[in-house]
Image (tube, rainbow, N blue to C red):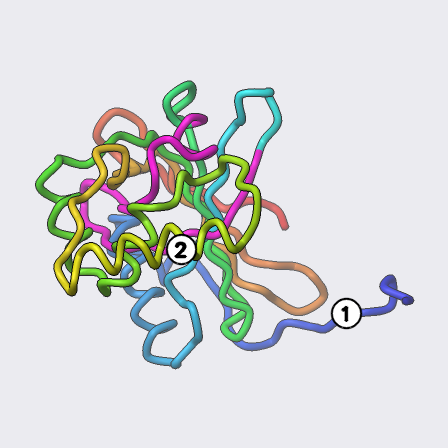
Amino acid sequence: MKLDSIRRDYKRASLTKKDLITDPTEFFSKWMHEALSAGLRDATSMALSTVGEDGFPQSRIVLLKDFNSDGFTFFTNYQSEKGRAISLNPKISLHFFWPELERQVRISGIAEKTPVQASEQYFHSRPLDSQIAAAVSAQSSEVPSRDYLEEKFSNLKNQLKGNDPERPEHWGGYLVRPVKFEFWQGRENRLHDRMVYEKQADNWIIKRLAP
C-alpha cells in the first residue's frame, strides 16, 4: 500500500466569525441539523476519549443521545473501561467527524452521571434485545467465547418471556458539560478554518486558530 499519495482537497464551504453564533451549543445544533438533513449515516456518532487507568488515552465510538445548554449525553456501562476511566478522571473529549460536509467538531468537557430517572427512561426506550444485551454483558471484561455471550443472552430472553429486564445499576448515562468547542471546516490548500470557543467564567471567548 502506498498511503502517502492519498489526498483530496476541501472546497465545500468556509467558516468565518460572522457565521458563528454566540452560544456554541446553538452553533453545534445548526451543524448537527445540517448533518442529519444531508442524510449522513451515523451523524450522531462521536469518538469519546478518556485517560485510562494505565495513563494512556483511549478512544472509542459512542452515540450522542441528547444535548442542550447543560451538555451532551451518552449512555454506557459504568463498569466498562471508559466508565472506570471517567471515575478516575472526568475530563474527557468528544469528536464528531462528518467527512461528507468536510467538518469536524471537538468538545472538551467534564463528565458526570445523569440522574437515575434519565437512565431508566432511556434504558427502557431501547429495543428489548438491546436491553437484554446490556443486562448480560459485563462490558470490557474478558469472556471465554462468543457462544458464552449468546447463551447468556438466550437464557435471559427466555426467562423474561417478552418482558423488559431491570436496568442494571451499573448501566446509565453521562452528561458532558463542555468547557471548550472547536469547529473545523476543511478548506483548499489545507488552510482549514478552525474556530474555538473557550469558556471563561460565564462567557464564551471566540478565536481563530491557524490550521
| Percent of width and height locating residue 71 | 25, 42
Q: Which corner quadrant holds the N terminus?
A: bottom right
The one of 158 and 63 positioned closer to us in this rendering? 158
Check if residue 193 falls in the magenta segment: no
Q: Is residue 181 left or right of residue 56?
A: left
Of the numbered discs in the image, which one, if any, rests on residue 7? Answer: 1
In this rendered view, identify the residue nearer to me: 37 or 23.
Answer: 37
| Image spot of residue 114 (x, y percent) | 19, 36
Task: Write down the region rendered in magenta.
Answer: 58-85
Q: Quadrant of residue 170?
A: top left
**Residue in view at x 40 percent, y 55 percent:** 17
In the displayed structure image, the side of residue 165 where residue 101 appears, left or right: right
Q: Residue at x 29, y 62 (%)?
A: 129
Q: Could you tell me if the residues under marks 1 and 2 are in contact, i.e. CB atoms within 8 Å?
A: no
Question: Amino acid type of disc 2?
Answer: Lys
- What's the amino acid at mark 1? Arg
Measured in 3D between alpha carbons, the distance from the residue under mark 1 to the one under mark 2, in whole angstroms, is 28 Å
Q: Position of residue 146 (x, y in %)?
A: 54, 54
Q: Quadrant of residue 171?
A: top left
The residue furthest right is 2
- Counting from the top left corner in percent of width and height, residue 11 is at 60, 76
How crowded pointer 2 is (Cα within 10 Å; few <14, some 14-19, many 20+) is rated as few
Q: Is residue 74 magenta?
A: yes
Q: Which mark is residue 17?
A: 2
Closer to us: mark 1 or mark 2?
Answer: 1
Q: Earlier in the sequence, mark 1 or mark 2?
A: 1
Give residue 185's mark. none
